[in-house]
């Protein structure tokens, strides 16, 4: 097990702009430690998805430094340690004839390397991930035949199958009904509290995040960090109200 406060993601003084335009992110610093459950919120266009892409190495910051598990991003190779569930999981291509089991096993390739044959242990880990998300009975079903909530669970299982230390989720419950959302958050709570899994969850729903996360970062070009999610609720909703009054 790691030291209590091992740094999983470290973002220091990061600024980013697309082309010559003004900065989308300006001097943003953020640290995610082992066991954290961080809610990342902010208005559309405020830069939260951009920050996420920078953390995952998909975009290069104009200035600043990002490291994962203490390793500068440019040298980081252990990508199986970070699982990713995108909001596009629900819009899975209906014509792609892949089964639930096959999708989850893809998570093992992240750990093993794409041209290696999967072992009995890999199959076992994929099966365990399916059980974790309560989707084992659907293993032979085509993903395109599942409901939105079931797809989300399958893509969470794929992330879990690579045995990551941290899972990053981008608006994972957009487009699912209330009951499905509740069950998904229950699952995330179990992963964080019982398994010690580090979670970074992007959302636009501050109230929900304040109930779930252990800390909140508000991204709106710059970044405001709240170690107490309830403080974010009080301060940010007050700010939003003040903006509404002034406009």
Image (cartoon, grey):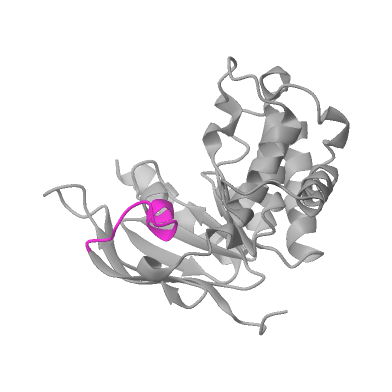
Q: Which residue is farthest right?
A: 137
- Residue 2: percent from left, percent from top: 67, 80
Using the rendered image of the protein, determine whether residue 208 is visible from the camera's viewpoint. Answer: no
In front here: 146 or 98?
A: 98
Highlighted range, magenta: 51-62
**Picture coordinates of residue 83, whole percent (x, y):** 59, 53
Judge from the rendering whether residue 1 lies leftward or rightward of residue 218; answer left or right: right
In terms of image quadrants, where is residue 231?
A: bottom right
Identified at 70% across, 40% down, the residue is: 104
Left of 17 or right of it: where is 204?
Answer: right
Residue 23 screen position, x and y as percent: 21, 55
The picture quadrant where one finds residue 7 is bottom right
Residue 56 drawn in magenta: yes
Q: Is residue 215 above or below residue 108?
A: below
244 w.r.t. 138: above or below: below
Classify the position of the N terminus by image quarter.
bottom right
> In the displayed image of the protein, which residue is found farthest to the left?
20
């Amino acid at each position: 097990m790691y030291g209590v406060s091992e740094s999983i993601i470290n973002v220091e003084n990061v600024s980013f702009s697309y082309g010559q335009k003004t900065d989308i992110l300006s001097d943003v610093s953020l640290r995610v430690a082992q066991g954290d459950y961080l809610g990342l919120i902010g208005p559309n266009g405020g830069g939260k998805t951009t920050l996420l892409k920078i953390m995952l190495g998909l975009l290069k910051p104009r200035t600043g430094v990002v490291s994962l598990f203490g390793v500068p991003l440019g040298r980081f190779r252990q990508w199986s340690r970070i699982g990713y569930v995108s909001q596009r999981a629900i819009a899975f291509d209906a014509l792609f004839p892949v089964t639930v089991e096959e999708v989850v096993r893809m998570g093992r390739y992240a750990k093993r390397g794409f041209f290696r044959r999967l072992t009995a242990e890999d199959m076992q880990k994929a099966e365990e991930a399916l059980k974790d998300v309560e989707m084992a009975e659907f293993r032979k079903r085509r993903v395109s035949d599942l409901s939105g909530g079931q797809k989300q669970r399958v893509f969470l299982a794929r992330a879990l199958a690579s045995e990551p230390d941290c899972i990053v989720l981008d608006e994972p419950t957009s487009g699912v009904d209330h009951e499905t959302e509740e069950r998904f958050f229950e699952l995330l709570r179990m992963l964080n509290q019982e398994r010690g899994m580090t979670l970074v969850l992007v959302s636009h729903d501050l109230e929900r995040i304040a109930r779930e996360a252990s800390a909140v970062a508000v991204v709106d070009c710059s970044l405001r960090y709240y170690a107490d999610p309830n403080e974010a609720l009080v301060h940010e909703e007050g700010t939003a109200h003040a903006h509404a009054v002034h406009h």
